[in-house]
Image: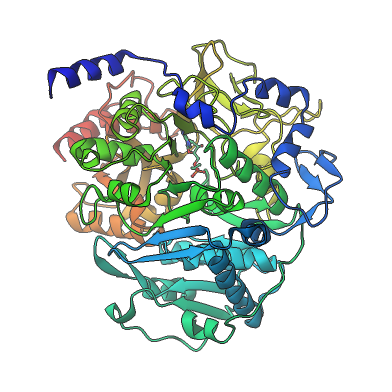
Amino acid sequence: MSQEDATLEARLAEQEAFEPPESFVEQANVTDPGIYDEFEENWPECWERAADLLSWDESYDTVLDDGNEPFYEWFTGGELNASYNCLDRHVEDGAADREAIKWEGELGETRSYTYGELLEEVETFAATLRGLGVEEDDVVTLYLPMIPELPIAMLACARLGAPHSVVFAGFSADALATRMNSADSEFLVTCDGYYRRGDALDHLSKTNEGLDGVDHEVSDVVVVDRLGDDLDHSLADNQRDYDELVAEYDGESVEPVSRDAEDMLFLMYTSGTTGQPKGVKHTTGGYLAYTAWTSHAVLDLEPEDTYWCSADIGWITGHSYIVYGPLALGTTSVMYEGTPDYPDKDRLWEIVEREGVDVFYTAPTAIRAFMKWGSDYPEEHDLSSLRLLGTVGEPINPRAWKWYYKHIGDEECPIVDTWWQTETGGMMITTLPGVNTMKPGSAGPPLPGVDARVVNAQGEEVDAGQAGYVTVNKPWPGMLRTLYNNDERFLSEYWQEYSDKDADEWVYFPEDGAKIDDDGYITILGRVDDVINVSGHRLGTMEIESAVVGVDGIAEAAVVGGDHEVKGEAVYVYAIPEDDYEGNAELEERAREAVLDSIGPIAKPEDVIFTPELPKTRSGKIMRRLLEDIASGNELGNTSTLRNPEVVDDIAAQVETD
Ligand code: PRX
């Protein structure tokens, strides 16, 4: 490192606050600090500003209907169609030739769709789905990787008013079956396979295995041929080749179905404390308004921009900020199929340079990997088209923030560290890039109109510097409306902890720990429930645990998250074998296989540790905190309250030698 670089590094390491660059502020969508007061004074009508970004078939009568708390309704009486808002209206406005999606496959092939072309594809596929019998309100499951057919199918569903339920392609066959069963979904769109690091993965066999576990009839399965001759497959009787099928409907137009603002747009399953994933329900009006508004105010998107969110559409980030938000604003969105290090570690920067990306949104785990690979990779490319950077999914440590700021943004791009969840639909806590000072490691203040607080166990706001829990004390348009077919679980998961029902005060509990500083900036500390965050992916420890205890020969298991340099957290399995305490390689292999089968490779255990006992309190509860500390290599606190303190050293010694 040169002397000059070293001085710069030292200055950055010390700096705790960063002002947004003037060149950014001059052109930003939101620059008036008065927006916070304006939203507060005019709440909930302030949210009309979000609704105004959309085209409504029928205008709404009421911004917020809180007649049946916490089952809030937004923009009631309004009618609209999400695919019309993401496509037709831009075409009608003369933007038919503007690029909507620029897709790049892992092997380098590209496909690009203008708004006019994307509309045609979506209409054709909507006609196809309708031809197969899909009707308004039927849930269509989409088990697809990052190929253009995924957003096409989502928008086709939205056009018909048929909610989609996207299942992340990396999830296992079991995960597909669980989600299709829970949603009673009779239609599936999948593909033969896709590429990962150059290898063709067989997705259809996994799909078929999943379909074996579906407990109702699946009338039709549409199979996209992604791999061509790279994979031989034969289709079952109810399976149809995507290309052959859409050819029958080519050129058909399908009128967008006018949906009530509160009608379901999609379902997205996410992990919770118990084993069963939760079907988060998002609606047409509130969700679309909220994602469009946050794309405008936080991502600063303009129709002229080329924008790239490197998430997978199989997670909420991709739904909100690859598909719905950016397309509602008429922006050009880049979509990439593969991994960031294939064929080399500069793949993303090569794409940024070639496509002239203006705004880039990724996850801290990716930034930590880039950091590890070194700054030579981004330095080989001209990244000067970038104007704004974003992160999402997990806390970003200040060192990674500063690396991103310097080596990707060249100290000229603000960074938005956006805290939100599957359930919130869109961003909740983050700086406005044209307004606020940035503090690395701290997401920032709640967005205008969002009443997020940091409270103690009694629900009282904590003092600056104290740790507490995040709550959201007022509803917002992008919020989940319920858990699919499970209002009871919706109430108990999110509204029980802090609401005062007698006083009719409803408080949403996201299950995150946090602290707040004197300026009202919130630093997220992580989940406080049994959910772990591996590379920004949310996994339920209970789901993993039930997979492991299902293995023949394993009597009991505890799964925890341990610190990991790149992934943020990694999965650690502690298991008690039925006999042969030493454990053996075969049992370990079976435990790993069970996790892969029930969830998928993202939940792959970092380590499986066999032990004769698990550390338990005198009342018999497993001390998970202690297991987390062992996995993270932390100093172990007082273990004297344990019923079996001697077991701790044994386990710790094993982790060290593994
Ligand atoms: O713990 C928080 C963490 O991710 C959780 C939500 O996960 P999921 O529903 O999968 O949505 C991820 C993408 C929105 C939160 O409860 N999280 C998300 N963003 C941040 C974060 N933690 C810290 N900082 C963030 N910016």
Residue 406 picture quarter: top left
**Vertical arrangement, residue 130 with respect to residue 378, above or below:** below
**Which residue is more in the foreground, 569 or 381?**
381
Residue in the foreground of this view, choosing between 477 and 292: 292
Q: Is residue 622 visible?
A: yes
Above or below: residue 357 compared with residue 595: above
Name the foreground residue: 498 vs 250: 250
Q: Which residue is depicted at the point 28% across and 78% down?
A: 230
- Up/down of 295 relative to 439, above or below: below
Q: Residue at x 70, y 46 (%)?
A: 286
Q: How many labels does the image show?
A: 0
Residue 580 appears left or right of 188: left
Q: Position of residue 603 (x, y in %)?
A: 36, 51
User: Residue 51: x and y, percent?
Assistant: 73, 44
Query: How far from the left and from the top, in percent, is residue 278?
Result: 57, 51
Q: In the displayed structure, would residue 440 be above or below residue 562? A: above
